[in-house]
Amino acid sequence: MGRRALSKIRRKELARAAHASLARHGMAGTTLARVAEEAGVSKASVLHYFRTKEDLLEAALRHGNSRLRDEVAALMRVARNPWERIYAVIEANLSPRAFRPPIAHGWISLSAAVPHNPQYQRIQTVIYARTRSNLVGPLRALSDPATAELMTAAVISVIDGVWLRCSLSLGGMSAPEARAQFELLLDARFPDSPERQAARAAMAEACRVLMASRGIES
Amino acid sequence: MGRRALSKIRRKELARAAHASLARHGMAGTTLARVAEEAGVSKASVLHYFRTKEDLLEAALRHGNSRLRDEVAALMRVARNPWERIYAVIEANLSPRAFRPPIAHGWISLSAAVPHNPQYQRIQTVIYARTRSNLVGPLRALSDPATAELMTAAVISVIDGVWLRCSLSLGGMSAPEARAQFELLLDARFPDSPERQAARAAMAEACRVLMASRGIES
DNA sequence: GCGTTTATTGACCAACGGGTCAATTTACTG
DNA sequence: CAGTAAATTGACCCGTTGGTCAATAAACGC
C-alpha cells in the first residue's frame, strides 16, 4: 500500500473521528485528545496529519457535508423530472442517515463557529449555493423565476429550521413531521398534481431503497 | 439604594455583558475575563454574582430571550384579532432590535450548547412552547386544529431558518426577504383576505412605531 | 542491505480558563 | 460611632488544551 494512499485514508479517518466527536460532544467537548481516542491514535498523530485544530475541524465539516452531498447527488441521479429533483433534495435532507440529532448537533455546532472562521464561512457558502442551485433549477421549470427564487429560499429555511429543531431534540422533530411542513410550503404555489404525487412517492421509495441497500433502518 | 436592588442591577448588567460577548465572540470566545471587561468589573466580581460560568450563561440566555419576549408581548397587546396576533409574532421576530446577525449568532451559540446542559434545554423548551402557544391560538381561530398545528410548526421552522441564516450573514438574510417567506407559507392555507392584509399592515406599522419610539432605526 | 523518508508516539511546554481565597473597602444597622 | 454584612478585587491555584520536539519504528527506493 502506497504511503500516499495511507495518508489519505488516515486523514479521512481522522476527519470522521472529529465529526463523530463533534456530533457527540459538541464544539467545546471536541478536543484533540478526544478525537485521537475516537480514532484510536495518539494526539501527536492527529497533529501530524492536521497542522492545527482548525484544519481538523474544517476537514470534519467537509466530511460531514460530503455525506449529505452524496445523498443528494445519488437521489438527483435517480430523478427524471423537476418534481423528482425537488423531492430528491427534500428526501435526502430527511434521510435517516443524516436527519438525526447527533448529526444535526454537529452541524449546528459548526454553524455557530462560522462567524469566527472565514474558511468555515466559505465552505458554508458553497454548501448553501449548491442546495440553492439544486432547488431553483427544477422550480424554475415549474413556475416563474421570482416564485422559484422565493420558494427556494423558503424551502432552505424550513430545512435549516427542522434541522435546528432536530439538533435540540425538543419535541423530537421527526422526518414525517418535517415532510408535512415541506408539503404545506409547496402547497402555497403548486397544486398537489398527479406528477407531484408520483414524484413524492418515487423519491421516498428511492430513498428507502438506498437506505435499505446500505442496511440503515429508519 | 438598597443592597438588594443593587445586587439585582449588577446581575442584570452582567447578564447583559455576557449576552453581548456571546453575540460578538461566540461561546468559545466568551470567557469570564471578557465578560468582566465588558461589564467594567473584575473577573472575581463576576464569580461573586454567579457561582459558575454556567449560571452566568444561563442568565445571558434568559436576558437575550427576554428582549424578544417583551417585543412579542408588546405587539400581542396591540393585536386585536387572530390575524394581528399571527403577524405580531412574525413582526416581533423580524424587528430590527432582534433580527441582527450578532443577536442571532448569540442565539445559535447557545442553541449549540443545549444538548450538553439540561438547564439550557429547559429554557429552550419554555421559549418554544410560548412561541407555539402564541401561534396556535390565532391559527385555530382561522382553520381546523390539524392545520393550525402544522402551520404553527412550519412558521416556527421558518423563524429558526431565517435566524440561522441571519447569524451566518451569508447572502445577508434581510427582514423583507424573511417576510416574503412567511407570506408564502401562509398562502399555503389562507387567501390574502382583506383582514389578513389589514392585519399585516397594522402590525408592521405597530412594530415601526414601537421601534421609532425607542429611537431604533431599521 | 542501506540510507532516507515517513509514521507514530511519549514527554514536555506555555497559555489560558474557571474557580478559590483572603484582604480591603464600602455600605447598612443599631 | 461601632460593628457587621456585603461588595470588590488582586493574587493565586490547578486542570486542561493546543501545539512542539526529539526519539523510535516502520516503510520505501536503490
Image: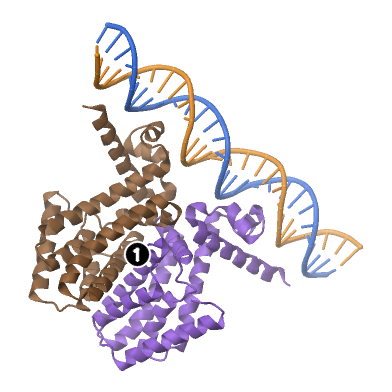
Chain colours: A purple, B brown, C orange, D blue
The quarter of the rendered structure image containing the C terminus of chain B is bottom left
* Between C14 and D8, the one nearer to me in the picture: D8
From the top left corner, tell me how far across and down residue B46 is, in percent: 37, 35
**Position of residue D7 in the picture relative to residue A39 (left or right):** left
Secondary structure found at label 1: loop
Asked which quadrant contains residue C7, the reply is bottom right
**Position of residue B170 in the picture relative to residue C3 (left or right):** left
**Looking at the image, is A161 positioned above or below residue A55?**
below
Residue occupied by mark 1: B170
From the top left corner, tell me how far across and down residue A66 is, in percent: 50, 72
* Between D1 and D3, the one nearer to me in the picture: D3
From the top left corner, tell me how far across and down residue B180 is, in percent: 22, 71
From the top left corner, tell me how far across and down residue A27 is, in percent: 48, 55
**Could you tell me which chain the residue with mark 1 belongs to?**
B
Question: How many marks on residues?
Answer: 1
Residue, x 35% and y 74% (percent of image)? A177
Residue, x 23% and y 27% (percent of image)? B2
Camera sees residue A192 = yes
Q: Residues within 10 Å of mark 1 (few under 14, many from 20)?
A: some
* Between A205 and C11, the one nearer to me in the picture: A205
The quarter of the rendered structure image containing the N terminus of chain B is top left
* Between B157 and A88, the one nearer to me in the picture: B157
As shown in the figure, which amino acid type bears the numbered disc 1? Leu
Residue, x 42% and y 52% (percent of image)? B118
**Looking at the image, is B216 positioned above or below residue A174?**
above
**Position of residue C3 in the picture relative to residue B89 (left or right):** right
Camera sees residue B106 = no
